[in-house]
Amino acid sequence: MKALVITFRELLGIDLSIFYTILARVLQAGGALIVVGLISLFLTKEEQGYYYTFSSVIAIQVFFELGLTSIITQYVAHEAVDLKWISATELVGPPEKLSRIASILMLCLKVFGILSALLFVLLLIGGLVFFSTYKAGSSTVSWQLPWGIMCLSTALMLTINPLLSFLEGLGQVKEVAQLRMRQQLLTLFIVVIVLSVKGGLYAQGIASLMSFFLLAGSILFSANKILFANILRQAAAWKISYRKEIFPYHYKIALSWISGYLIFQLFNPILFATEGPVVAGQMGITLAALNGVSSISMSWINTKITLFSSLVARKEYSILDTIFNKTVAQLAAINAVLLIIFVALLQAITLFDNPLNGRFLPFLPVTLLCVTVFINQFVFSWATYLRCHKKEPFLWISVLSGILCMCSSLILGKQFGVMGMVTGYTVLTAIISGLGGYYVFVTKKREWHQMPKEDTTNV
């Protein structure tokens, strides 16, 4: 039995980093199902619309983060190649490498502290204006104070996430995954408790606020605090210049992340404004479930970012491609199985009289969304692989997809409702992201990994 378990783990490529990440995602996805049941019991369909539209509006934080957290992991991983751990709180290596890493840590502390304050103000004011403008038919929903708590917790979390990305870049992928798992457990527990006592829309904000305290405590009251202090003491003349080294790459990532918001987060606000909170709630709960499925399978690739970046830094492209191809095959199989199970469960729900009936989108739009999720697994994987080279060749695809999806959602959504919106999104995903993304992946990989003629015998 032990040998069978080991063989199964090797087949699926599950190491401890992936295990803890998957467990966190499973808790998130499984918790989402529990939350769905509680929402159907304790929230009206209008409140459900607010619940999920809150998340979509909160996602505007992407305009402040702009993908910098993911870049931090990659840059730290590249600089840490020549460093060694001598204890849980101290790294040794070339002074210039230690100094450059210290400059990244200072960037995390200074820049994100300022961005956090600005984010809170913008979210609070922007949300109050949006929900006050489109509250027709749902004026009885009390959303103002819950929204304020959501804004505060989101802004605070923005100060913690870059520090966790920094730790991942240093190779602490497993430790951060464990912490994320505990965060998911706490979040689920708080949401379940608040919804059960009829706390309604307060659930998200309070859970997020408690998650912040957990993550902040894991840094302030652990070896990580000493580690950060030791790294900062290594600051010297060698620094990573944001303007010269990071910005030429970051602005492309930033545009890609903004495009991602236009693609994935506009559905709920548009439907909330045009179709009302009930339809927005159906879209929100469906997307939440599918995002849970996607996050589980994408754990296979996300936990490899540090490894991929290190292999790129050492130019070990053959090993990189072997691991990447195996990882993509594993996550695609997992994703397909989970999507089939999800659709089957939704069909089973419709056969019985239960509170979940009418909470999700109908079968056809759900199926189309499943197709986009499956295609995007490959697109996200290709993009991750190429971005580990500290380059962003997917920029034009991201921007074009974002603009076209925004136009498609606004026009087709207004004319044909949910079905028009989802159909347009699926077609654009297949053509631009799928076919276009594969072309970019193949051509850029071939271009970047070309060896000089005298070295081709070693390829």
Image (cartoon, grey):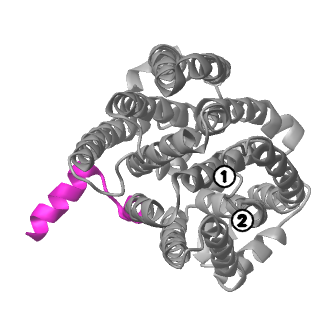
For residue 227, side relative to residue 337 (left or right): right
Type of residue at label 1?
A: Phe
Is residue 247 within the magenta segment? no
Magenta region, residue range: 1-26
Whether 257 is drawn above or below 334: the answer is above
Marks 2 & 1, CB-CB < 8 Å contact: yes
What residue is pinned by disc 2? 146
Q: Is residue 409 left or right of residue 226?
A: left
Q: Nearer the viewer, residue 163 or 87?
A: 163
Taking depth in this image into account, of 295 and 326 the one nearest to the observer is 295
Give the camera-side residue of 242 and 289.
289
> In this rendering, does residue 397 appear at all?
no
Q: Secondary structure at mark 2?
A: helix
Q: Quadrant of the C terminus?
A: top left
Element on which disc 1 rests: helix
Q: Which residue is mark 1?
A: 54
In screen coordinates, is 336 left or right of 28?
left
- Above or below residue 376? Residue 111 is below
| Left or right for 287, reference 153 | left
Q: Which of the image's four quarters has the N terminus?
A: bottom left
Residue 374 picture location, percent across and down: 37, 32
Measured from the top left, where is residue 328 in percent x and y?
36, 37
Query: In the rendering, at what x and y percent does residue 11 appear?
Result: 21, 49
Specify the principal SS of the magenta part.
helix
Q: Nearer the N terminus, badge 2 or badge 1?
A: 1
